[in-house]
């Protein structure tokens, strides 16, 4: 495989990244764990006994943290296109969230229960074409929001990673129609040059 300048830069950044080193030292599955820790510290989203859906979960960095916040009687249902090693307290579905089959498998596990929180760290497989990648990213975000609106409890919460670009501002406006409080958050553990930001949507109407 030919390594591009951007891929080489990513490898260099990854190897020197303090959060990668800390994740390894603490036994976290990925540096993404620190993002959910920052979100919880600031917004106190997750409570004991919550039912949480984790979309785009592999390798499990978010689920690993969330199960600690929700306690033994809580439940995380995680989903990703990639495989994920088992975690106690987490039911995992491997599949494409945009497919009807995977969506139905998720619904069967939810079993008509109303959800306390939906979190989405989903991102498409990047092609290198910014326009195409952004469009794919926004499609996944639309699906995540639709699932949240359909299944959340009243006053439930929704967290989503968004890449700044075409459609992202409109997406924030769309979320504000369904939640009483919407905040844009950039975790310290998010790489500074990354276009990603997180929408913290609280109190589903």
Image (cartoon, rainbow, N blue to C red):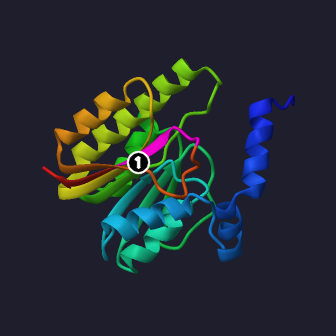
Asked if residue 92 is among those painted magenta in the image, a careful observer would answer: no
86 left or right of 148? Answer: right
Q: Which residue position holds label 1? A: 198
92 on left or right of 6: left
Residue 198 in the magenta stretch? The answer is: yes
User: How many residues crowd around disc 1 within 10 Å: few (fewer than 14), some, or many (20 or more)?
Assistant: many
Residue span colored magenta: 193-199
Answer yes or no: is residue 112 visible. no
Residue positioned most to the front: 192
Q: Viewer-proximal residue, 63 or 15?
A: 15
- Where is residue 59 shown, x and y percent of the image? 61, 56
For residue 119, side relative to residue 148 (left or right)? right
Quadrant of image for the N terminus: top right
SS at circle 1:
strand
The x, y position of residue 55, in whole percent, is: 45, 49
Drawn side of residue 198 relative to residue 43, left or right: right
Tell me the residue at 64%/63% (across/down): 19
Q: Residue at x 41, y 48 (%)?
A: 198
Q: Residue furthest right?
A: 1
| Residue 192 visible in the snapshot | yes
Residue at 53% from the left image edge and 64% from the top image edge:
34
Query: Residue 200: percent from the left, percent from the top?
Result: 32, 52
């Amino acid at each position: 495989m030919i390594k591009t300048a951007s891929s080489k830069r990513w490898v260099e950044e990854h190897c020197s990244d303090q959060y990668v080193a800390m994740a390894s030292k603490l036994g976290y599955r990925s540096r993404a764990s620190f993002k959910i820790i920052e979100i919880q510290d600031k917004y106190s989203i997750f409570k004991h006994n919550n039912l949480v859906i984790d979309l785009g979960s592999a390798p499990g960095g978010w689920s690993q943290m969330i199960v600690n916040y929700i306690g033994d009687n809580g439940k995380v249902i995680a989903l990703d296109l990639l495989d994920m090693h088992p975690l106690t307290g987490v039911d995992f579905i491997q599949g494409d969230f945009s497919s009807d089959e995977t969506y139905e498998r998720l619904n069967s596990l939810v079993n008509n229960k109303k959800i306390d929180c939906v979190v989405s760290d989903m991102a498409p497989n990047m092609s290198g074409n910014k326009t195409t990648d952004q469009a794919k990213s926004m499609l996944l975000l639309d699906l995540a929001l639709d699932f949240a609106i359909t299944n959340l409890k009243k006053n439930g919460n929704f967290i989503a990673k968004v890449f700044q670009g075409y459609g992202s501002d409109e997406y924030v406006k769309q979320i504000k129609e369904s939640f009483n409080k919407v905040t844009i958050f950039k975790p310290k553990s998010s790489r500074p040059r990354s276009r990603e930001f997180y929408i913290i949507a609280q109190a589903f109407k």
